[in-house]
Image: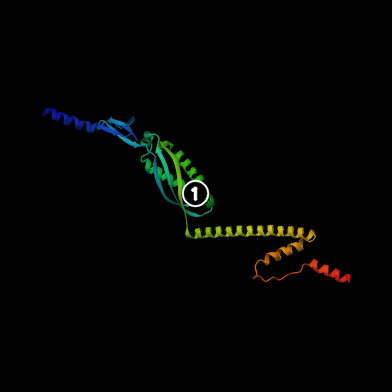
């Protein structure tokens, strides 16, 4: 009976003083309120009342930064949201230097995102998301060094515009497409005119070339019996008749 009591007492003591640190965690140990070191993965002894251990998750965390309203450099109101990937690199700093690093990182990312968006124009924000994301990552990473945090990546998910601004951008894009279409059409007409001028020059300089081209056109038209051909007599033929009449 005494052995059973002793075993039960030992089990109770073990449960009271043993703490498990998982492979992905680090234990920040405090003895009588003073920081006394980091505990690696495994079972660790923590003496109640005198000691306390704060476990820190060292895995990469993906934090969704809620949508922030910001004003771009060219005074356009936009809504921007993002996701930030970070991990704790120094468990002691994450516990000793900041009260709640998870909340602190979220607030830091929000303010930094608003500030960076305010430094760029709308076109740059829409076209250069990767560049903006990298700038946000760099600023947040530098600011969180004292917290023992390493920021791996920041991704801008959405840039939300007001409805009237979306319509304005759509009209601008449509006008740009129409402008390009007009330019392409004009360039095609210029090229066509140049080719026609070259063809006319060649036909005019070679004797009989115009007659051969006329006969070829008539041959092409005659392949379809439903066509009605209005034949235009070349000026050279009329001049030939004039010479013949003048000879008589």
SS class, disc 1 = helix
Q: Nearer the viewer, residue 230 or 155?
A: 230
Residue 128 at x, y percent in the picture: 52, 48
Whether residue 189 is visible: yes
Residue appearing at x 70%, y 65% in the figure: 219
Relative to residue 198, is residue 47 depicted above or below? Answer: above
The part of the image, by quadrant, that contains residue 4 is: top left
Whether residue 31 is visible: no
Give the quadrant of the N terminus: top left
Residue 63 at x, y percent in the picture: 39, 45
The part of the image, by quadrant, that contains residue 52 is: top left
- Name the residue carrying label 1: 117
Q: Is residue 202 left or right of residue 108?
A: right
Residue at the right extreme? 248
Q: Is residue 113 left or right of residue 235?
A: left
Residue appearing at x 68%, y 64% in the figure: 220
Relative to residue 12, is residue 75 depicted above or below? Answer: below
């Amino acid at each position: 009976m005494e052995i059973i009591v002793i075993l039960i007492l030992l089990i109770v003591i073990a449960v009271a003083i043993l703490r498990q640190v998982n492979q992905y965690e680090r234990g920040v140990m405090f003895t009588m309120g003073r920081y006394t070191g980091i505990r690696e993965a495994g079972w660790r002894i923590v003496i109640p009342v005198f000691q306390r251990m704060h476990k820190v998750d060292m895995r990469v965390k993906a934090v969704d930064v809620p949508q922030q309203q910001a004003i771009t450099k060219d005074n356009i109101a936009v809504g921007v949201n993002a996701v930030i990937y970070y991990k704790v690199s120094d468990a002691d700093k994450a516990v000793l230097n900041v009260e709640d690093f998870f909340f602190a990182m979220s607030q830091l990312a929000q303010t930094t995102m608003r500030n960076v968006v305010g430094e760029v124009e709308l076109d740059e924000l829409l076209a250069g998301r990767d560049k903006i994301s990298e700038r946000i990552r760099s600023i947040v990473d530098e600011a969180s060094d004292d917290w023992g945090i390493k920021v791996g990546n920041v991704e801008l998910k959405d840039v939300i515009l007001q409805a009237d601004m979306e319509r304005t951008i759509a009209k601008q894009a449509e006008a740009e497409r129409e402008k390009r279409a007009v330019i392409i059409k004009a360039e095609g007409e210029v090229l066509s005119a140049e080719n026609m001028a070259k063809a006319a020059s060649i036909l005019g300089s070679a004797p009989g070339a115009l007659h051969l081209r006329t006969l070829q056109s008539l041959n092409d038209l005659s392949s379809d019996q439903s066509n009605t051909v209005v034949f235009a007599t070349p000026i050279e033929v009329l001049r030939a008749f004039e010479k013949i009449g003048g000879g008589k």
